[in-house]
Image: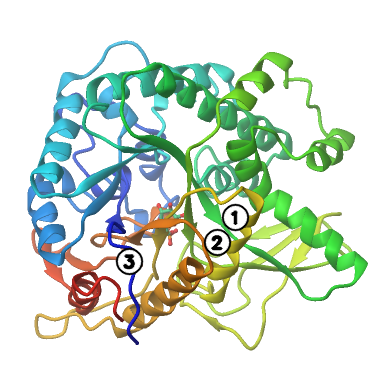
Amino acid sequence: SKIEFPQNFLWGSATASYQAEGAYKEDGKGLSIWDVYTHIEGNSKNNSNGDVASDHYHKYKEDIKHMKECGQNSYRFSISWPRILPEGRGKINPKGIEFYKNMINECLKNDIKPFVTIYHWDLPQSLQDIGGWENKETAYAFRDFSKILYEELGDKVELWVTFNEPRFFIYSGYLIGNYPPSYNDPQKTIQASYNVMLANAFAIEEFRKSNAKGKIGLVHSFSPVYAISDSKEDRIALRNADNYFNNWVLDTAVKGKFPQDLIDKLNRNYDLSFMNKEDLEIIKNNTVDFIGLNYYARALVKAYTIGETVLKVNNSGKAKQGSSKIVVKDWFEMVADPKSKFTDWDTEIYPRGLYDGIMMVKERYDNIPIYITENGIGMVEEMVSGEIDDSPRIEFLKLHLIEIYNALSSGADVRGYYVWSTFDLYSWVNGYEKRYGLMYVDYENNNKRIPKKSYHWYKDVINSNGSI
Ligand code: BGP
């Protein structure tokens, strides 16, 4: 169908430092919590790790060349905190700064707008050693880290985000326990969540004080919530789930305030005495310019019935439908729609959720500018006579682009779209067999890059400005 996106729309793709760069001990880089975690037997699929990853550290020029040839006009990547500050604070590693300056210059030379994520989960281990995100000191350290980046890179970068997916990394690390620091503790989860939202506000405050040009936002792991019915019980579950998945991040980042009903509910069972007036004032006064939405799937919920909390998410390998299960005691239960399609990792494929989600954000947050900062599908893929036919990915991306187009037509201010991911990379605890890239990485053969069928398709899409 012939559809047209706005002329200045950003067409890009995304990666993250730990998943892409490798060079985990090179040029003075310190260790991150992921370096340490993946080196412990049994933590990651096949004991895989990001030591080499896609070797982006050495191949970034070639990678940017491929983006350029594809027509992409923006690249979303993250900065490795321990590459800049090996101990998390204090001494700066000049080689780290140099690497990102080179990356940014290479982008600009190729008319590719760098979109910089300050934190995509690779916390310096030294900060974990003092308590990580549970400790407010880490929020202060993040503020100082962000300040260094604005000073060093602020004249060239126009699009910044503080955090990638607070909800996802905190729940995985503190509530589910399948990411570092591997806790299973609601009290710690609440405290870490609070400190991350405070750190977000600190970094925005520094941004406004600096000479950096451009805009700053936050990237949210977006699960628009639907209830299976309109009954009173299901509507309460919907609100609870929305607070659990979305509102504590989005309301706080955009409106500068945690949802009051959430705070009241938590207050009944947990100790919130760490919240103080001064912090809340900082949160209130330092809100985002835009929101980045990473969209993979929606959340379909019903009223909580009985039993203890169960948080079983399938991200350690291929699994049958129904292998993941989420019940949050007294809050809601997640359900799967048996009529839906699911990926090999039991993630529902639900493009319509992207339209509904964008419109929801538009309504709630006063037409705030939106970037779709990640969208993609994990697949097991093989090279057949030198080629990779990832037609299901093309189908997936196409259906989602149509929903973005529809949202634009309904008046939403969507400014860009980033495919996850630019090339195949380390999929956290899933290891390497779950691939997302527009470019294939031949891990066995010097990490050779091979454009997939979806790469060529994306090139056509961009060329015709969205005609798909
Ligand atoms: C998002 C993360 C990415 C990426 C993606 C796919 O939550 O921001 O870093 O990994 O999800 O997830 P996974 O690799 O677990 O399939």
Residue at the spot of label 2:
358
Labels 2 & 1 near each other (Cβ < 8 A):
yes
Q: Earlier in the sequence, mark 3 or mark 2?
A: 2
Give the x, y percent position of residue 378: 39, 70
Q: Residue furthest right?
A: 232
Q: In which quadrant is the C terminus drawn?
A: bottom left
Nearer the viewer's eye, disc 3 or disc 2? 2
Residue in front for this viewpoint, 360 or 174 = 360
Label 3 and label 2: CA atoms lie apart by 23 Å
Q: Earlier in the sequence, mark 3 or mark 1?
A: 1
| Image quadrant where residue 357 sits | bottom right
Q: Is mark 3 within 8 Å of ligand 1?
A: yes
Quadrant location, ligand no. 1: bottom left
Q: Residues within 10 Å of mark 1 (few under 14, many from 20)?
A: many
Indicate the secondary structure of the residue bearing disc 2. helix
Residue at the spot of label 3:
436
Label 3 and label 1: CA atoms lie apart by 26 Å
Residue at the spot of label 1:
361
Give the x, y percent position of residue 185: 69, 39
Number of numbered labels in the structure image: 3
Give the x, y percent position of residue 221: 53, 53
Residue in front for this viewpoint, 394 or 207 = 207
Indicate the secondary structure of the residue bearing disc 1. helix
Taking the spot 64% from the left edge, 30% from the top edge, the residue there is 194
